[in-house]
Image (cartoon, rainbow, N blue to C red):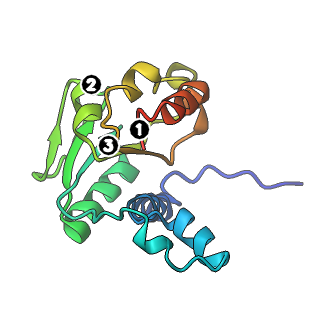
Amino acid sequence: GIPVVYAPGSNSQSVAEHTMALILACARHLKETNLGYAKGDYQIKNRISFSEISGKTLSIIGFGNIAKMVAAMAYHGFNMRIVAYDTNPNISGIPEYVQICSDINEVFSVGDFVSVHIPGTSDNTGFINYDLLCKMKSTSFIINTSRGNVIDTNDLFRAIDNKIIA
């Protein structure tokens, strides 16, 4: 009695907007700031280093429909540099403002924010691992709005605990 539908693209806009919200939340440390304010610590804003996303580099892993929307929002709305990697060498519809790289290591190393947009297939389980996370800058954030299994969770915790990534 539960309807099941296949509706590709129906939530693409929503996921793309959510991705941008997460990027902004990381740059502005919204979680920490909000918790401080909730505890009455209004000076927390003086102890946290905020950053603007304008002029920063967004690295995108997987360049399908959602990723293309994120790239457009980041470039047109926030003046971000866009670098992308996709395992499909025949991707189409690449805007002139997107630099496609064939080397995933380069994409991870240049991004101030790395946004993951690959399907959660068995082939992609654990695709993002400790070695790739170690390529990131220590000030970089990783955003995953694809499926959770594409990042090796233990490796992610290790990278955060060891301050490899922000």
Label 3 environment density (alpha carbons within 10 Å; few <14, some 14–19, many ≥20): many
**Residue type indicated by callout 1:** Ile
Any mark on residue 58, and which?
none
Decide if residue 152 is on the left or right side of residue 45: right
Q: Helix, strand or loop at disc 3?
A: strand
Q: Residue at x 46, y 27 (%)?
A: 128
Q: Are marks 1 and 3 in contact (CB under 8 Å)?
A: no
Q: Residue at x 51, y 43 (%)?
A: 146
Residue 42 vertical position relative to residue 63 in the rendered view, above or below: below
Q: How many marks?
A: 3
Q: Is residue 145 visible?
A: yes
Relative image position of residue 72 (x, y in whole percent): 25, 61
Q: CA distance from mark 1 to mark 3?
A: 16 Å
Q: Residue furthest right?
A: 1
Decide if residue 114 is on the left or right side of residue 119: left
Report the residue marked by disc 2: 105
Q: Residue furthest left?
A: 96
Q: Residue at x 29, y 47 (%)?
A: 112
Report the residue marked by disc 1: 165
Q: Of callouts 3 and 2, which one flags the residue occurring earlier in the amino acid sequence? A: 3
1 vs 3, front mark? 1
